[in-house]
Image (cartoon, rainbow, N blue to C red):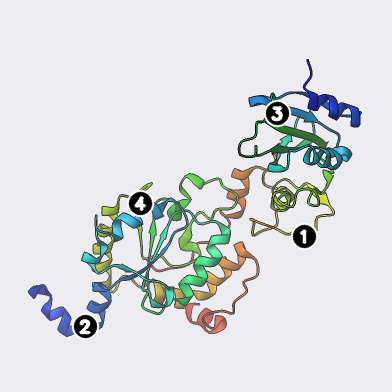
Amino acid sequence: MDRNQFIKWIESPGKMAHKYSLHAVYFSTGCGIIEVPPSITARWDAERFGVIPTATPRHANLFLITGYVSLKTLRAIIRTYEQMPEPKFTVGFGSCPINGGMYYDSYNTIKHLDRYMPIDGYIAGCMPRPEAIFIAVTHLWTLIDKDMADGYKRYRKYYAQYRANQERVLGRLEWPPLFPLEKVHEASA
Amino acid sequence: MKHPLEVRLASVFKDIRTGPGPDGRLAVAAPAESVVPVLTFLKEDGFDFLQLVSCVDWIREDQIEVVYLLSKYVPAGGEAEAGVTGIVLKTRVPRAEPVLATSIHVFPVAEPYEREMHELFGVTFEGHPRLIPLLLEREYKIPPFRKDFDTRKYCEDFFGSVPPVGEKK
């Protein structure tokens, strides 16, 4: 343990624990999955940074969306995200979740993922190198330290807007709202 | 000189045209109503493997072309009949009302292909048990793989109209 961080551990042990045990669920929508096996195995070894893949989103607190998001995938992504326990952090991987990337004129691929769910950070590139994942993880540490990785709080606060956008592209959603819609709407208004 | 298979086909079906196709395949052009009989005939003739059913939108000719690719496995130790390695069966239907008879009862593997063509090209297959969407999540006014579907305009109109969520900067 770094001695310089001793004060941080005393002040907010929960935050530090979240920071150094990021359990990731890799949502392998596109080509980004190619970068994930080398980064979690011996070559780049994500466990040095406390990042370890989990079997189920219910055990995870880091959500990596690696690649383009089609409409059908968006439905699964939202369901996965809503299953994760709080606090949860999301990272969009590659240029496709940012603005569509090379699928900017695809009829079935959403362009801005942050209009449907909160994103704490993006890794730009097509594709990013595995090193970029670890740069993102260290950035995420800083964000968690400064309480800026607050995507799950924003999701709670603006849930009515997120849900409206989700229903706009997906039509009817099969699952009930995660948070009460009216109350949140009044609070944000 | 015609291949024996062409002669056999011509003796049964009067309204089809045959000729040499790419890669040693035999190209067959048939009207829409005789597609299923031709497929049945070819299946009994040995071409019992439907590789692919695909679709081409000929917008200038106002027609939609449905393409069936057939081939066969040569049994171990056996020898293929010389000349023809596969069949390219093409048929054309009008673009305004593309209706074909389903070929599921001949080749059950055609089921997902026909569903896919139904949602992406708007081709209706009569007799198909469930023409429900296979890949798409939304209903499109124009099927998205048709040439007159403007993807860029659709993206600007539809995805561009989704508002960003009001988050504090």
The residue type indicated by label 3 comes to Glu
Taking A134 as reference, is B78 above or below it? Answer: above
Q: Give neighbour class at mark 1: few <14, some 14-19, many 20+ (Cα, 10 Å).
A: few
> Circle 3 is placed at which residue position?
B81
The residue type indicated by label 4 comes to Ala
| Marks 2 and 1 in Cβ contact (< 8 Å) | no
Label 4 SS: loop
**Disc 3 or 1, which lies upstream in sequence?**
3
Residue at the spot x=40%, y=77% of the render?
A153
| Marks 4 and 1 in Cβ contact (< 8 Å) | no
Q: Label 3 vs label 1: CA separation? A: 37 Å
Taking B115 as reference, is A87 above or below it? Answer: below
User: Is there one chain holding both mark 3 and mark 1?
Assistant: yes
Q: Is residue B93 left or right of residue B27?
A: right
| Marks 3 and 1 in Cβ contact (< 8 Å) | no
**Disc 2 or 4, which lies upstream in sequence?**
2
Q: Please identify the quarter of the rendering in which residue B92 is found.
A: top right
Label 1: chain letter: B
User: Is there one chain holding both mark 4 and mark 1?
Assistant: no
Residue at the spot x=90%, y=31% of the render?
B12
Label 3: chain letter: B
For discs 2 and 1, the disc positioned in front in the rendered view: 1
Taking B122 as reference, is A53 above or below it? Answer: below
Q: How far from the left and from the top, in percent, is residue B65?
A: 76, 36
Label 3 SS: loop
Q: Give neighbour class at mark 2: few <14, some 14-19, many 20+ (Cα, 10 Å).
A: few
